[in-house]
Image: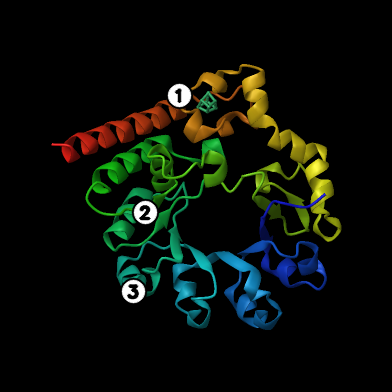
Amino acid sequence: MMHVNDYTLNVPLPLAVARGQAATTDGHALHLRVEDTGALVKANDAIPWQRVWEITGPTIEDFALLTAYHDRARWNLWWKRFDVGRLLDLAPSLRRRTVTVLVAPDDPDLHEKLLLGDSLSLRMAVPLTDPDSQNLEELNRVISYVLITGATRPVHMDPVSSMVATAMGHQDLTLWDFADENVHRNLFVDDAGQVSLSARHLTTHPYGPLGELNLEDMERGTSYQRLSSYAQELFVSRSECATCRAYPLCGGWLRYVDRGYDCEVWHLVLTALLEAVGATERTRKLTRHR
Ligand code: SF4
């Protein structure tokens, strides 16, 4: 059977450079997790750079020390210390399309950081890891900001900007994609070399050790099949998701791990976003035809 999927392998730096591991998933893009930028520099010659698509882990301060590597990949950089003066110093090098500045969902300065980053034209993002990681009140504030400000100039604040793009029909991505949990695209490898869809699926949906991974066998395996047939099941079983207005954005992601998860507030937030985008588009079309 020919293999048709192209995966991005989210892998810790030491495993990406370990002898023999690179060949296992030959041809697929690498998303490196880097905890120690010194180790990145040290391992430079052993890193298969031609396959590195994205790097996550360094801070915005670390990035200033990695100028030789700036153009080698896309960078997701943590903004931890809320030092406005330092950010202003770093902004010129962060203001590139290949850099996204990450703010943790539980960061006490989340809103201020997102707005300040946007005012400096930085690409900002709050990682989506599980339904409970997101502060929905905060998400709602960011949605309003993106919709209002985005009407006059580009705003990049993920996952909201990606949700708006989906709602406008510019792409067909859902919360599965925004959380890097697209079963046909994402593979996650933990520090011990175990592979699954993402960190939170390692114990429930193990694909096996990286060194022994055969992608065709993996796709035939129970864990993979359960994940990939989920959307179909939702419709066959006529679940609430199948008729939910938020489904085009959610894809049932909120209830995959816990079928009884109370998604009511998420549902309100997502449908409000869909309606707001629809209303904005209708106004734009009417204005254009006057
Ligand atoms: S919001 Fe809830 S009901 Fe709607 S698709 Fe998502 S999980 Fe299903």
Q: Nearer the viewer, mark 3 or mark 1?
A: 1
- Quick one: SS at disc 1? loop
Specify the color scheme. Answer: rainbow
The percent coordinates of residue 34 (x first, y second) are 61, 67
Question: Which mark is drawn over residue 116?
Answer: none
Please give the label number shown on residue 245. Answer: 1
Q: Residue at x 67, y 48 (%)?
A: 199
Q: Quadrant of residue 85?
A: bottom left
Which of the 4 image quadrants contains residue 251? Answer: top right
Q: Is mark 1 within 8 Å of ligand 1?
A: yes
Q: Nearer the viewer, mark 2 or mark 1?
A: 1
Nearer-N-terminus badge (2/1): 2
Q: Is residue 9 above or below residue 37?
A: above
Q: Which mark is residue 92?
A: 3
The three-letter code of the residue at mark 2 reads: His
Crowd class of label 1 (few under 14; some 14 to 19; many from 20; radius 10 Å): some
